[in-house]
Each structure stands twice: as structure tokens, then as C-alpha cells.
Amino acid sequence: MSPQWIVIGVLIALVYFIFIKNKPLSNQGSSKKDEKLNDDDMVECKKCGTYITLNEAKLSEGQYFCSDECLNA
């Protein structure tokens, strides 16, 4: 195999890995934090780990708590 073909192969591999493989798909771009939450969705208490519905949760500084006890602890 001549050195020219090796160089061409390396260049093709670089183009593939830089431009094609790292290109995010449209479905992968959205994260779970970007989704809107409904009142029936379950969230985890930051302190004790209990899961509660969103309408029962106490929100403080972007974190959810299950009760005033966990919120103030």
C-alpha cells in the first residue's frame, strides 16, 4: 500500500469523526430539564429521596422537597 492511500484514509477518518460522528441528532439535543413538567409528574426530594407529585412538592432554589421538614433541614 502506498503512503498516498494511507494519508487519504487518515483524512477520510478525520473528516468522519469530526463532522459526522459528533453531529448531534435532533432527538438527542433536548434534555430532560428542557421538558415541561405536568402536575402529575413525579419529582425526587433533594433531602430524603422520596418521590412526590409536582403539585405536592415544595420548590426552593430550583430544588424540590417533600415537606417543610426536608426543606428546612
Image: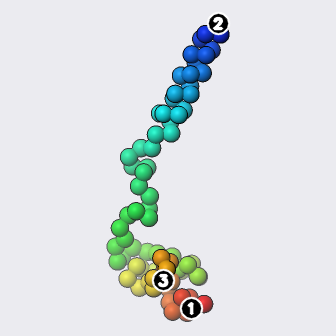
- For the residues labelled 2 and 3, the Cα–Cα distance comes to 65 Å
Q: Earlier in the sequence, mark 3 or mark 1?
A: 3
Q: Nearer the viewer, residue 11 or 49?
A: 11
Is residue 19 shown above or below 64? Answer: above
Q: CA distance from mark 1 to mark 2?
A: 71 Å
> Which quadrant of the structure image shows residue 42?
bottom left
Do we see residue 26 in this rendering?
yes
Q: Of helix, strand and loop, which one carries label 3?
A: strand
Three-letter residue code for mark 2: Ser
Look at the picture and state if 46 lies above or below 14.
Answer: below
* Marks 2 and 3, the one that precedes in the sequence: 2
Q: Which residue position is annotated with label 2?
A: 2
Q: Quadrant of the C terminus?
A: bottom right
Write down the residue under mark 3: 60
> Measuring 45% from the left and 85% from the top, which residue is drawn there?
58
Q: Residue at x 39, y 73 (%)?
A: 41
Residue depicted at 45% across the width and 82% down the height: 59
Rendered image: mark on residue 72: 1
Q: Nearer the viewer, residue 71 or 48?
A: 71
Give the side of residue 66 with respect to residue 36, left or right: right
**Label 2: few (<14), some or many (≥20) within 10 Å?**
few
